[in-house]
Amino acid sequence: MPATMNRADALISFERLASECSREGWDGYGAEPVRPETVAQAVRFLDALPKQFPVPAPGVEPDGCVTLEWYESPD
């Protein structure tokens, strides 16, 4: 995710990623699905962040959890 991505684009990207990983085995190795409740909680967290915070990069894990990561620089 580019460092300049805005909050709305990040939410769209996150929801798309979560949707792609909503079925069991989405990674081809038996990964747990990302549940809608997990996505909703992460979105609430993102919405609660102060507007001056940088936008985190969303991700998903094979255990069905979501991640929100902040990077100091692309490198």
Image (cartoon, rainbow, N blue to C red):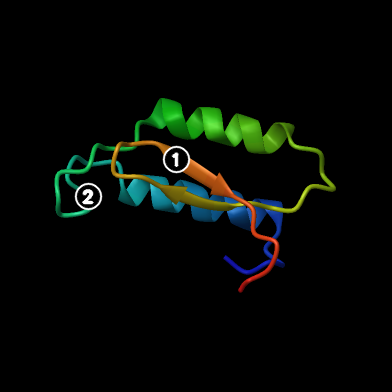
Q: Mark 1 highlights which residue?
A: 66
**Disc 2 vs disc 1: which is toward the camera?**
1
User: 75 or 40, which lies in front?
Assistant: 75
Q: Neighbour class for label 2 at 10 Å: few (<14), some, many (≥20)?
A: some
Q: Which of the two labelled residues, at mark 2 and mark 1, occupies the earlier sequence position?
A: 2
Image x and y of residue 21, in percent:
31, 47
Callout 2: SS: loop
Q: Residues within 10 Å of mark 1 (few under 14, many from 20)?
A: many
**Pointer 2 residue:** 26
Residue 59 rendering spot, x and y as whole percentages: 46, 51
Q: Quadrant of residue 9?
A: bottom right
Q: Quadrant of residue 3?
A: bottom right
- Note whether 43 is above or below 11 in the view shown: above
In whole angstroms, how far apart are the C-alphas of marks 2 and 1?
14 Å
* 14 sits left or right of 18 in the view: right
Residue 55 at x, y percent in the picture: 69, 53
Depth check: 52 or 37 in front? Answer: 52
Could you tell me which secondary element the residue under label 1 belongs to?
strand
Give residue 57's position: percent from left, percent from top: 57, 55
Amino acid type, mark 1: Val
Q: Residue at x 63, y 32 (%)?
A: 45
Front position in the image: 51 or 31: 31
Q: Residue furthest bottom?
A: 75
